[in-house]
Image (tube, rainbow, N blue to C red):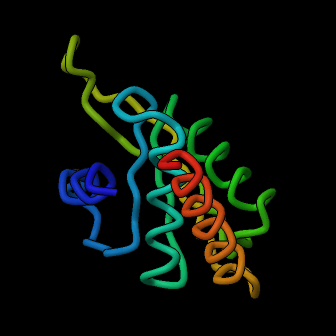
Amino acid sequence: MEEITEGVNAINIGSGDTYKKNRIQVSNTKKPLFFYVNLAKRYMQQHNEVELSALGMAIATVVTVAEILKNNGLAVEKKIMTSTVDMKDDSRGRPIQKAKIEIVLGKTENFDELMAAAAEEREAAEGEEQN
């Protein structure tokens, strides 16, 4: 859990966006997929919803995270927004456009029950390892 907290503190907020406590900006190179899945679960526990955001090639990662949460019965889609963002190409210095996606997910009615059941399973598994 400390790793997740460190990740939350290290998340870089884009200069043009307003700061949102429940936004996760996903990269497809920096962290493993399930880091984002677990972080989204934590954000939903704290804020009742989470906004997943990504640019370019990281869009596939955001969609995968959202689908994992939905298929496990933890989240429902509230809103999906797509757009293009003007950026500067670092190698050539000219402007380029990148695709952007933002997916807002909310807790399902049985989110808390499913999270409690998962926590109990983890505790039981840890108890068995110690014996």
Percent position (x, y) of residue 116? 62, 77
Q: Quadrant of residue 102?
A: bottom right
Question: Residue 51, can we see it?
Answer: yes
Question: Residue 77, can we see it?
Answer: no
For the view shown, which residue lies furthest in the top direction? Answer: 91
Image position of 122 with respect to 104: above or below? above
Q: Residue at x 69, y 72 (%)?
A: 117
Q: Quadrant of the N terminus?
A: bottom left
Q: Residue at x 62, y 36 (%)?
A: 60
Q: Quadrant of residue 85?
A: top left
Instruction: Count the marks.
Output: 0
Q: Residue at x 75, y 83 (%)?
A: 110
For the view shown, which residue lies furthest in the front direction? Answer: 131
Q: Quadrant of residue 5?
A: bottom left
Image position of 16 with respect to 74: above or below? above
Left or right, 103 with reference to 18:
right
Image position of 46 with respect to 64: above or below? below
Left or right, 6 with reference to 62:
left
Percent position (x, y) of residue 115? 62, 73
Percent position (x, y) of residue 12? 22, 51
Depth check: give the residue in front, 43 or 52: 43
